């Protein structure tokens, strides 16, 4: 079974505008996770499903350009400061974070959990803003963290507002990664889509991690920003399904309503 939260390759074979070498270099950068201290060429090759010789050339080039840095005396790499510049430029364009943060913090304090704003990258949701309750024993996640689209409340919420064609293409990629788990994953996604229609939120009660519960809502921010989703989650002993649906859900929907109305469509 492959890691469904990691990158997947898509190389249009007949698109003359598609630069395969550039795509592979970006895949190398995208395979690094927030929990990684450093990766060797073999690990990168396995994650990107590329030949090790190709990866070696990519990491050498990316290191020279500052997008990777090599640990002295080792053959392992970490993301370099040039990546930080790209990330900072992107985050600075997300005006929604400034509006969302106080609303998210208030919701986190009420729920006793964590509240996250995320956008999709391939088969993952990336947190672009994250607030914790001061009283909560929170999940070890923060801005830049990745969680899988298929099993998380925030990922299912994003899928619920995605156009049918885009959603179907993404589901096919998820199916190809793990045929054995696909029936269970598909059932969870289909239930999430139905919950989003009937309840206004998606649910993940032990689906992403067995001791974590969460609910999410997908939406279109407007102002040229990418489709996003907002979720509330935390340890199941602290956030029961009943509490999330009965007490937290109305407040989550109101926060999303305010965010949707804050920017022109």
Image: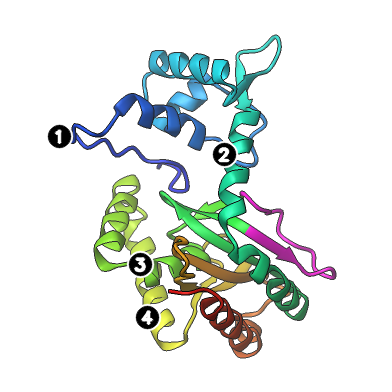
Residue 84 lies, in percent from the top left, at 63, 37
Real-space CA distance between mark 4 and mark 2, rounded to the nearest whole angstrom? 37 Å
Residue wearing tag 2: 86
Q: Decide: marks 3, 1 in contact (CB < 8 A)?
A: no
Residue 46 lies, in percent from the top left, at 44, 28
Nearest to viewer (mark 2 / mark 1): 2
Badge 3 or badge 4: first in the primary sequence = 3
Badge 3 or badge 1: first in the primary sequence = 1
Nearest to viewer (mark 3 / mark 2): 2
| Residue nearest the viewer, comparing 133 with 24 | 24
State which quadrant residue 50 falls in: top left
Residue 248 relative to residue 5: left or right: right
| Residue nearest the viewer, comparing 227 with 94 | 94
Residue range highlighted in magenta: 129-144
Residue wearing tag 1: 14
Q: Report the disc number at residue 162.
A: 3
Q: Decide: marks 4, 2 in contact (CB < 8 A)?
A: no
Nearest to viewer (mark 1 / mark 4): 1
Real-space CA distance between mark 3 and mark 1, rounded to the nearest whole angstrom? 26 Å
Real-space CA distance between mark 2 and mark 1, rounded to the nearest whole angstrom? 29 Å
Residue 15 relative to residue 7: left or right: left
Residue 188 lies, in percent from the top left, at 40, 69
| Residue nearest the viewer, comparing 125 with 103 | 103
Dot 1: element: loop
Nearest to viewer (mark 4 / mark 2): 2
**Crowdedness near tag 1: few (<14), some (14–19) or many (≥20) residues, C-alpha within 10 Å:** few
In which quadrant is the N terminus drawn?
A: top left
Residue shown at 43%/48% (left/top)? 4
Q: Report the disc number at residue 194.
A: 4
């Amino acid at each position: 079974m492959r890691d469904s939260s990691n990158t997947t390759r898509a190389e249009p074979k007949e698109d003359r505008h598609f630069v395969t070498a550039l795509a592979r270099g970006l895949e190398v950068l995208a395979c690094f996770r927030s929990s990684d201290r450093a990766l060797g060429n073999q690990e990168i090759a396995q994650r990107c499903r590329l030949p090790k010789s190709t990866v070696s050339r990519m990491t050498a080039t990316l290191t020279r350009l500052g997008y990777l840095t090599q640990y002295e005396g080792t053959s392992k790499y970490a993301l370099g400061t040039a990546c930080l510049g790209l990330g900072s430029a992107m985050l600075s364009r997300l005006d929604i974070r400034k509006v969302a943060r106080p609303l998210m913090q208030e919701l986190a304090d009420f729920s006793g959990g964590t509240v996250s704003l995320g956008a999709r990258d391939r088969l993952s949701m990336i947190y672009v803003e994250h607030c914790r309750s001061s009283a909560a024993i929170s999940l070890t996640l923060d801005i830049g963290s990745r969680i899988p689209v298929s099993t998380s409340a925030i990922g299912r919420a994003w899928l619920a507002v995605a156009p049918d064609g885009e959603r179907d293409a993404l589901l096919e990629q998820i199916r190809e990664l793990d045929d054995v788990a696909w029936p269970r994953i598909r059932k969870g996604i289909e239930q999430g889509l139905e919950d989003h229609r009937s309840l206004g939120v998606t649910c993940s009660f032990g689906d992403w991690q067995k001791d974590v519960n969460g609910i999410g809502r997908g939406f279109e921010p407007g102002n040229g920003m990418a489709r996003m989703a907002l979720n509330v989650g935390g340890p199941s002993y602290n956030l029961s399904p009943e509490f999330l649906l009965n007490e937290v859900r109305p407040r989550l929907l109101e926060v999303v309503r305010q965010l949707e109305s804050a920017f022109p469509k």
